[in-house]
Image (spheres, grey):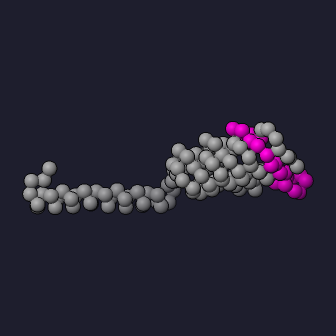
Amino acid sequence: MASSSAEKTKWLRAINQAVDQALNGAAQDAGSPGSKAEPPISRTASYTFYKDGRLKDATYEGRWLAGKPHGRGILKWPDGRIYTGSFKNGLEDGFGEFICPNKALNKDDFYQGYWKEGKMHGLGTYR
């Protein structure tokens, strides 16, 4: 504990400097070239996956919980696949729609229905 006003002022200045450095350092790290931001913990946000094999280069926009898609969202892959619907613990789960380009037929495959743990499951329509 500071025993004089001079010590108290010095102590407060040191704390403010440390807070400023931490905040400025965090902002610089997130924006520096080559660094990858981590997924948000719990909020609505957009994020492009860069590690996960199944989701590599896919962009997710929607609700998050504990760093994983959870709730309503949309997942888009660079090859044109799109899933719009519910997520649970990072996987498609609940009702959703999936569009997948089919180059052989020159039109999209489409599934609308229920999902469980990332796979089509239950009632749905596939065309």
Q: Can residue 108 be seen in this view?
A: yes
Does the segment drawn in magenta span residue 105? yes
Q: Does residue 114 sit above or below 14 in this rendering?
A: above
Left of 5 or right of it: where is 65? right
Q: Which residue is drawn at 37% across and 59% down?
A: 23
Q: Which residue is drawn at 79% across and 38% down?
A: 122
Q: Can residue 57 be seen in this view?
A: no
Q: Point out residue 25 in the picture as x, y percentages from the top left corner.
A: 38, 58
Q: Looking at this rendering, what residue extends furthest in the right direction?
A: 105
The range drawn in magenta is 100-120
Does the segment drawn in magenta span residue 42? no
Most foreground residue, 110 or 70: 70
Q: Which residue is drawn at 69% across and 42% down?
A: 93
Left of 17 or right of it: where is 44? right
Most foreground residue, 34 or 74: 74
Most foreground residue, 105 or 91: 91
Left of 17 or right of it: where is 11? left
Q: Point out residue 81 in the picture as x, y percentages from the top left corner.
A: 75, 53
Q: In which quarter of the image is residue 5?
A: bottom left
Label the magenta part by its dominant secondary structure: strand
Q: Point out residue 3 in the picture as x, y percentages from the top left corner.
A: 9, 53
Q: Looking at this rendering, what residue extends furthest in the left direction?
A: 4
Q: Which residue is drawn at 68% across and 53% down?
A: 75
Q: Point out residue 116 in the picture as x, y percentages from the top left corner.
A: 72, 38
How many circles with numbers are drawn on the protein? 0
